[in-house]
Structures are given as C-alpha cells and as structure tokens.
C-alpha cells in the first residue's frame, strides 16, 4: 500500500509540472505483446520448425486422423480448440502448409503458387496428414505437453519431428522489431547433409525453390542476415522473336511477373509486342518481340528491369528455449540432426523399457502358473488381500535374483487378476519362446542404442528412399554475370542539341538531333577549348557553347579511341594524341589539353574500334619554311591516358588540317573468352579462350543433342547449357560425326563442312529425337575402331579409315552405315596420317609404304588430338 501511495504522489507531482509520463504498466504491456507475437505467431521453433498455428493444425489433424480425407472446414473447427485467433488465420496457414506438399495430403482446389490463384472455400476442399508427416512428426510418448489456452485440452509444446523440417519448408514471418525468413531447401539434399554431419564430413546447403528458376548463392551467407540470393526466371528462346518464361523466381507469380514486364514496357525500358500467359500446371509465358528487337538483349533487359530477376535476403531467426536466436542454416541442420538422433534414442529406450516390462511380467506369469502358486493352501486360506500378496511375494523369492527389477505390489495384484481360462491354456514352450523373442529384441535395441549414429544414418536413408523419389532439385545453381542496365535498356529517348544556346536534352525537339539514347544513359561532351565532361541524360541541361562532340558514354569502354589535334595556347605548339575515356566523375570538367588559356581543338574524331586516320596538314606561309604540306598517321601514335600531353605535331602556324584517308583499327582483333559458369562471352580473360575476333568472324557451338549453331561475337549473346564444344569458326575445317540413327536403328558416320547459317540451331543427325550423337572429331584423317556386342560379340574389332570410307557431303546427308552387326562400342583411335603433315598425295602414299601401320605419336601430338576429338559413347 505504501508503494501505491508513493506512485500516486509521483503522478500528481508530474501532472503538477505539466508533464504526463507513461507508467511502467504500459511498458510492460508492450513487452508482453512483443514477446507474444514473437513466440506465439511469427517465428518458428528450431525444434520442429513450426509456428504455433501450424503446430496446432497438425495436432488437430492427428487427432482427427482415421486415414480418410476431412473437410478443411472441419479441420479449422478442430484447431480452434487450441488456436484462439479465428478461422481465417487457421485457414490461411492450412492452405500454405498444403501448398508446400510435404506434411499435408491435399484434395481439391488448393490454389496455385505459380499463378497466385487462391484456394476454394474450406467447405469444398479436403485434407489429411501425409504418410511422411505420420512417420516423422508424431509420437505421443516423446511429446512434451501443455494445457491449451482455455485449460480444457492438452497441446504439444513442440512436435517430436525427426527431420530438418524448418529448412525443408522454409518460413517467413514479421514480429515486433523482429523478422524471420528462412528459405526452403531440397528434401534429399537435407538428408544427405544430415548424413554427412553424422559422419563428421563437410557439407553445404543451398535453397531450392518450388517455382524452379536459377539462383546465384555466392552471397548466401549460410542464410544469416546480410546475405542475398539472386534468383532468375528461366527464359528460353523459341525463335528470334519469341521468348518463353518457363520457371519463376521465388516469391513471384505469373501475374506479378507479367505486371512487371508491362510496367517496364510502359516505361520504355524494353519493347514487347505481346504477352501470352499459357500457364496451367507448368509455367509458360510467351513474350513476343517486334521486328528489329534483339532477343538476347531483351533477355538481359528482362533480368535488369523486371521481376525476372529478384534479390532475396534471408534472415535465419528461430526460437529456442523461448528466446529468439540467429543461427545459420548449417547450424539449424546440425541441431535438427542432433534432435533426430536424441528422439530416435529416446524411442528406442522407451521401447526397451516396454519390452523389459513385458519380459518381467511374462516371467512372473510363467513362475506363477508353473509353480501353481495360485493353488497353495496358504494362498487359498488367506484372510485378506495383504496376506495373499505376502504369500505370493514369499513364493517368488527364489526367482527374484533372475528378474530384471524388483517385484512390486502392482505386479502381484496383476498376477492375481489372471483368468482361469488363460491358466488352463498356458503352454510352457510358447511362454519360453515369447520370452526369448523379447530378449532378442532387447538385445537388438541395445545394439542400436550403442551404435545410435549408424542407426540414425540408416533412418535418414530409409526416409530418403521412401519419400524422396520425386523430390529432385528444381532450382539450378548458377553464377550470374552482373547485367549493366545501361547496356541493355532500350533507346527510349532522342537526344537533341541547341547549338546556339548550349543546351542538350530530350525535350528540345526543335533543336538539332544527336542520337537515340535511354533515360538512364550518360552523355559525354567535348568542347572546342579542350574541356570535356560527363553528364546524365535529362530533359534539358546546359553544357556550354562551341561544342565539338556529343555522344552516349559507355563506362569502361577501352575500344572507343579519341584522335585529337590541339593547339597549346593562342600561338603555341600543335600536339596530337590518342586516348580513351573509361570512367570519370559525373559533371566534373576535365581538359584534354595542357590547360593553357586560348588552347583549341583543331581536329577531333571518335573511333568506336580504335581506327586511326591519316591527316593532311597545311602550314601557313612563312619565311624560310620550304615544306608547307605534310601527312601524319595516327596509327603511328601509341594510345595513352586521357591526361597525356601528346606528341608534337608542329611548332609552326597551321593553316588547315584535313582528313586524307580513313584508317583501320589499330587495336587488332577483339580477344574473346567463354565463361562456362555463366554461359556468356567476355573480354575479361574469364574462362575458355576462343580466339581473336574481328569483322565477320563467328563462333561455332556444337550441342550434345547433335545440333550446331553459329553466333557472332557480341558479348550479349545467350547460349543454351547443353554445350558440347564451343570454338572460333573455321570454314575450312571438316567435321567427322558418328551417330546412332533411330530411324534406321544403325550407327552412321558422316563428314561435312559447317554451313554458314546464323540465327538458329541446325541438327546434323536428323530430326528423330531418339537419334543420338556418339562422337565428333576435327581430325583430318580419323580412324574408328568398332567393338561388336550381343550375338556378334565374338567378331573381331573392325578398323574404319573414315576418309576412305566416306567423302565430304552436306550436313543434311544421312551418311554411311558403319556396320550391320550389333555394336558394343565405337571409339576413335590414333590416326595413321597426322593432321599437321602438309604433304602431297604422292608423299602420303610413300609415307604409307615406309611407316608401319601402328604409329606411336610424339607426346606433342596427343594434346592436340585431344582438343580435336570428343566422344559421347
């Protein structure tokens, strides 16, 4: 009471000061509410991976389970005994559990995670627990219970789940000042990781999303805060004007994805003619492109500007011992695996205790009946129950040392309840067999407990074999190349230049047209006084008068070379220089001259591929100056930094500088590599070096299904993942191919030169999808060895000289049948004639006479031949 009066006095004093403070009661209320939301609604428990509403749903379904489907409305009603938050929250949670297709066997329209369509009303759909849930999630003997909210029922504190369920299902929840987002993982990979952990081996875990797609997990950070996962839709090229989206990024539906594409099209980031959504049980969104639109560039733009690529930020937060903890998915798996081991051990120990109890009573029963204790005179003449119990206990005394535990009063009372019918049917041999079977089972359990780790591994293997057959990984693990938005955005604006006023912008439609651009581009501006800057595209911006050159700026562009002649000061020396601008600070002025007042550009050219012109220089007449005209070739100058002074052109006054002839690129060909991780070309020395490309050079890709395609060396090209071989195209090379023709059901060989058709995949083994490629080789004089099988297995191997066997024909030709016999294997063997031997036919014939049939190639030839041949047999 004294404390209450003191609080009242303090409150009155505070009010007297004109300030009202919240009492501690409100702080307690907020903390209580926050704790309630965290523990009872939003965040799952690490033990079973379930939120309270999910756990209560499963418990209610277990109570109702009779093997048949129950109406979802009935399940909701049953769950409301344990969850006091209304039917809507229970129904939504139940549908989400059903859509995960793991714990609940659903029947009816449960919605579609691909399209985002909702489920039917609870009265129309049905559900029951899956066989997997019944096997791994329930055991009343190992469950800890608590009273429900109204005290009328008992509900589990956590379910005894013997599986890393939290990682399999994933979870997302927002509490007060706390959030949890654990991404779903693959069923079989979780089991493999658990087995690896039990074997004390290393393991890695990456999410697997039900909507498929591909993902880059390089920054996954074990699912902890601060990590990020890039997820992409699967986009396929049907033809040059049609793209098909067949898999979705995690968390997106066909509706949201199409909406994002439409918004990007409305903002002119991409150009799409039409979108068709043919999704049913599988995703199929057809994106139709207009004429003149690059399909490869559009694919990149879809990833850059739409929900075809999303970044997901995991946040592994769970509840343990009624407190939120932040641990990575590897640690979650370890704790779940340890819990599985402990639960299995507990189940074994419980079963062992039950068997020991059964053995104990069976032994007492055997002694009681065989020794006819029930017919003892003392027993029959006992005056009360205590005297009868004391007599039986005395008679059992000789056998007590052999029993597993002490004989209790309850044991004796149970013996006294044995019916006479059972005594009359008692069979000593059967009793002994029963006791022996119990002893054997106890011994087996003791072995399992002793080797509990091996037992747990076998349990996981059993679960995988029984339930993991149709649970292959859906999300492809990939490394993504960063897409520069400015390189793939559609040129949705036109840039204009007001030369008189010195303004550039996209709104100056009456001014001079410069070029097409996008609204996210940067513009580089060179002035005649040698100053230059980079500025963002805008509707209108002042850049100054006397402009020499305006263009869209490409960051890190080392191939655009600027050739410049400038005068240093008003009467100074003329310099010439070549330089590239790869990066600058936006809106900061730079100077390509020495900065002397009165400096001026006399010649300027921007060359996208490093071209070097030849200039004609005319000097002003001057006493003692005999040569007034001379030529200078920019190709003789080295390309230096943008701040370099340059080389002296002349110290005399210049009358005129004119272009005599355009030059060719001084940068040589462009060196191209192919990165097998991201299936993209690059010029950054990543992956396999394809060669130096220029002009009309092409890239040849041979695919594993017996198709080839020619590409240009544009870095934006997309390639399919089933690549067998990729290389720079050489029109002079002849490809030798061995394949199985499914139409004729024989093996064929053919030789042909690649037709220069760009833009589509071409099959060179026919149109039958069952035909298959066996081997390919670029060797000029290939030899094949045929090993026979089946009923022809006794036949000697046959050697085929391919050049003599068949001539060079079209890729459309079927080729020539290798043999009519059954084939076990076809392999390429060492050629007799070397590819590098540049000989005439007469020299080849002479060589054949002088050299033995079996030729041992030098070591240097082996590596070269390995590059030129590949077998798929």
Image: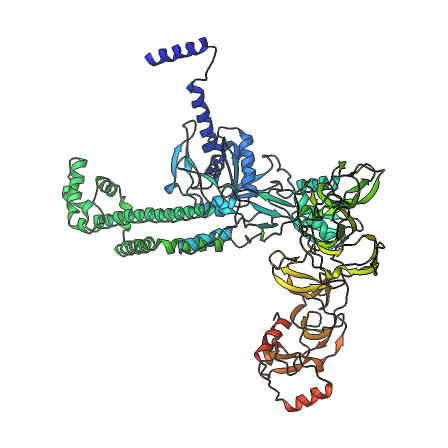
Q: Is residue 395 above or below residue 785?
A: above
Asked whether 218 or 790 is in front, the reply is 218
**Residue at the image position 15 percent from the left and 50 percent from the top:** 398
Report whether 654 appears left or right of 247: right
**Residue that protrudes farthest toward the top in the picture:** 16
Return the residue nearer the eye: 581 or 315: 581
Q: Where does the C terminus fall, quadrant-wise?
A: bottom right
The quadrant of the image that shows the N terminus is top left
Q: Residue 423 location in percent, x, y?
A: 26, 48
Q: Position of residue 137 (x, y in %)?
A: 44, 44
All told, the count of numbered labels is 0
Residue 128 is left or right of residue 11, and the answer is: right
Q: Position of residue 596 (x, y in %)?
A: 71, 45
Asked which quadrant contains residue 856, the reply is bottom right
Give the residue at x 61% y 69%: 872
Q: Nearer the viewer, residue 396 or 80?
A: 80
């Amino acid at each position: 009471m004294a404390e209450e009066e003191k609080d009242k006095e303090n409150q009155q004093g505070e009010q007297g000061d004109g300030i009202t403070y919240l009492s501690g009661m409100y702080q307690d209320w907020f903390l209580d509410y926050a704790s309630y939301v965290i523990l009872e609604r939003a965040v799952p428990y690490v033990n079973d991976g379930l939120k309270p509403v999910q756990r209560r749903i499963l418990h209610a379904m277990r109570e109702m389970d009779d093997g048949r489907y129950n109406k979802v409305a009935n399940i909701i009603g049953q769950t409301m005994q344990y969850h006091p938050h209304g039917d809507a929250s229970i129904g939504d949670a139940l549908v989400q559990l059903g859509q995960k297709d793991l714990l609940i066997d659903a029947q009816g329209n449960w919605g579609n995670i691909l399209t985002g369509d909702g489920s039917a009303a609870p009265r129309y759909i049905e559900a029951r627990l899956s066989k997997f849930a019944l096997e791994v999630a329930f055991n009343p003997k190992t469950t800890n219970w608590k009273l429900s909210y109204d005290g009328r029922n008992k509900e589990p504190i956590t379910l005894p789940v013997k599986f890393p369920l939290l990682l399999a299902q994933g979870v997302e929840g927002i509490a007060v000042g706390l959030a949890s987002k654990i991404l779903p993982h693959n069923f079989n990979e979780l089991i493999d990781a658990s087995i690896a952990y039990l074997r004390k081996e290393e393991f890695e875990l990456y999410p697997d999303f039900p909507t498929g797609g591909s993902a880059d997990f390089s920054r996954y950070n074990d699912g902890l805060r601060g990590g990020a996962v890039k997820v992409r839709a699967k986009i396929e090229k049907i033809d040059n004007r049609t793209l098909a989206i067949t898999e979705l990024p995690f968390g997106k539906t066909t509706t949201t994805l199409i909406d994002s594409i439409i918004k990007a099209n409305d903002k002119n980031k991409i150009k799409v003619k039409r979108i068709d959504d043919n999704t049913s049980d599988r995703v199929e969104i057809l994106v139709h492109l207009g004429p003149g639109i690059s399909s490869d560039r559009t694919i990149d733009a879809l990833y850059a500007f739409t929900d075809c690529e999303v970044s997901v930020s995991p946040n592994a937060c769970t509840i343990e011992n009624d407190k939120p903890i932040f641990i990575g998915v590897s640690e979650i798996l370890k704790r779940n695996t340890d819990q599985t081991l402990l639960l299995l051990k507990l189940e074994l120990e419980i079963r062992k205790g039950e068997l020991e109890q059964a053995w104990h009573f069976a032994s007492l029963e055997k002694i009681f009946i065989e020794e006819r204790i029930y017919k003892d005179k003392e027993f029959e003449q006992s005056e009360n129950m205590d005297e009868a119990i004391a007599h039986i206990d005395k008679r059992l005394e000789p056998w007590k040392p052999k029993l597993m535990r002490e004989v209790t009063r309850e044991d004796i009372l149970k013996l006294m309840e044995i019916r006479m019918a059972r005594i009359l049917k008692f069979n000593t041999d059967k009793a002994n067999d029963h006791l022996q079977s119990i002893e054997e089972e106890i011994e087996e359990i003791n072995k399992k407990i002793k080797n509990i780790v091996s037992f747990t591994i076998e349990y996981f293997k059993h679960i995988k074999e029984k339930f993991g057959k149709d649970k292959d990984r859906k999300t492809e693990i990939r490394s993504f190349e960063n897409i520069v938005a400015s390189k793939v955005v559609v040129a949705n604006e036109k840039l204009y230049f007001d030369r008189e006023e010195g303004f550039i912008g996209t709104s100056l439609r009456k001014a001079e047209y410069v070029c097409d651009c996008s609204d996210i581009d940067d513009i580089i501006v060179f002035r005649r006084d040698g100053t230059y800057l980079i500025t963002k595209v805008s509707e209108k911006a002042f850049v100054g008068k006397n402009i020499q050159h305006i263009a869209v700026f490409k960051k890190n562009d080392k191939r655009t070379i600027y050739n410049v002649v400038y005068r240093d000061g008003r009467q100074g020396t003329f310099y010439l220089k070549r330089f590239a601008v790869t990066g600058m600070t936006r809106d900061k002025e730079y100077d390509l001259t020495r900065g002397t007042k009165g400096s001026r550009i006399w010649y300027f050219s921007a060359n996208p591929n490093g071209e070097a012109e030849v200039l004609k220089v005319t000097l002003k007449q001057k006493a003692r100056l005999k040569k007034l005209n001379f030529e200078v070739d920019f190709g003789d100058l080295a390309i230096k930094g943008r701040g370099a002074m340059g080389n002296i052109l002349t110290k005399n006054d210049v009358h005129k500088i004119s272009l005599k002839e355009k030059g060719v690129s001084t940068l040589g060909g462009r060196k191209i590599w192919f990165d097998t991780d991201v299936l993209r070309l690059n010029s950054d020395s990543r992956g396999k070096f394809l060669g130096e490309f220029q002009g009309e050079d092409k890239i040849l890709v041979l695919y594993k299904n017996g198709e080839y395609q020619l590409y240009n060396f544009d870095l934006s090209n997309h390639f399919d993942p089933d690549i067998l071989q990729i290389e720079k195209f050489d029109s002079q090379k002849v490809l030798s191919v061995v394949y199985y023709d499914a139409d004729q059901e024989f093996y064929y060989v053919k030789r042909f030169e690649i037709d220069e058709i760009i833009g589509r995949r071409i099959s060179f083994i026919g149109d039958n999808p069952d035909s298959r490629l066996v081997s390919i080789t670029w060797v000029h004089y290939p030899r094949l060895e045929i090993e026979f099988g089946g009923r022809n297995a006794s036949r000697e191997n046959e050697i085929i000289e391919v050049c003599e066997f068949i001539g060079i024909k079209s890729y459309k030709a079927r080729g020539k049948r290798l043999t009519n016999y059954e084939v076990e294997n076809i392999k390429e063997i060492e050629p007799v004639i070397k590819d590098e031997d540049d000989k005439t036919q007469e020299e080849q014939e002479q060589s054949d006479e002088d050299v033995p049939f079996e030729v041992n190639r030098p070591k240097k030839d082996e590596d070269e031949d390995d590059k030129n041949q590949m077998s798929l047999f």
